[in-house]
Image (spheres, helix red, strand yellow):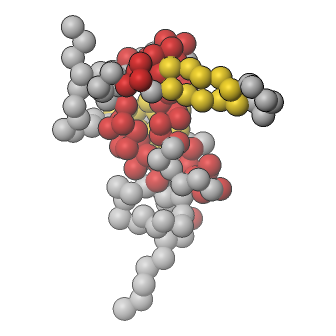
Amino acid sequence: MRTYSTKPADIKRTWHVIDAQDLVLGRLSTVAASLLRGKHKAIYAPHLDTGDYVIVVNAAKVAMSSNKAERKFDYRHSGYPGALTITSYADLLATKPEFVVEKSIKGMLPHNRLGHAMAKKLKVYAGPEHPHTAQNPVPYVIENARRVSQG
């Protein structure tokens, strides 16, 4: 019996749409990162990019659990002395919700060339519309996800 090794020609990529409305950010990110890596496929190999494309819509309506929007901060530094910029996630969700979701998902991917190639297959949109209808994306429902009720 020979060991099967996945070849790039064997990889079939599909497009998935995830609706982020009222989903907790961390649970959404783990599912999306798993789809991008290809861990849901039988041909998964950690050294190959076997993952699918992921479209996340309604990123502006994503929820953060346990008051994290006010307690968690994003840090940016330009490299100059005294140029540290600190922004709360509540402000980021109001101004750049795509950045919050992208940063969370990219943080769960490998931090090398392979991870950068996987991150290019991630498309995040703040509203419910996306321009990828020609790719025939399949809706992906996250089961057993904790949804935060707005009300």
Q: How many marks?
A: 0
The spot of residue 20 in percent (x, y) is: 36, 26
State whether residue 45 is above or below residue 80. below
Q: Residue furthest right?
A: 80
Query: Percent position (x, y) of residue 36?
Result: 47, 48
Q: Residue furthest front?
A: 82
Q: Is 137 situated above or below 150?
A: below
Question: Which one is in front, 124 or 63?
Answer: 63
In the picture as drawn, the residue positioned furthest to the left comes out as 144
The quarter of the image holding the N terminus is: bottom left
Tell me if residue 121 comes above or below residue 95 in the rendering: below
* Above or below, 130 relative to 16: above
Quarter of the picture holding the C terminus: top left
Q: Nearer the viewer, residue 5 or 12?
A: 5
Viewer can see residue 133: no
Please indicate, yes or no, whether residue 148 appears anywhere in the rendered image.
yes
User: Which image quadrant for residue 19?
Assistant: top left
**Relative to 150, 129 lies left or right:** right
| Residue placed furthest toward the bottom | 1
Relative image position of residue 65 (x, y in whole percent): 30, 27
Depth check: 47 or 104 in front?
A: 104
The quarter of the displayed image where residue 32 is located: top left
Left or right: 64, with 136 as reference point: left
* Residue depicted at 37% across the width and 44% down the height: 30
Residue at position x 54%, y 13% in the image: 95
Q: Residue at x 24, y 22 (%)?
A: 148
- Observer-nearest of 144 and 6: 144
Residue that appears at 35% across and 64% down: 42
The image shows residue 94 at horizontal and vertical percentages of 49, 12
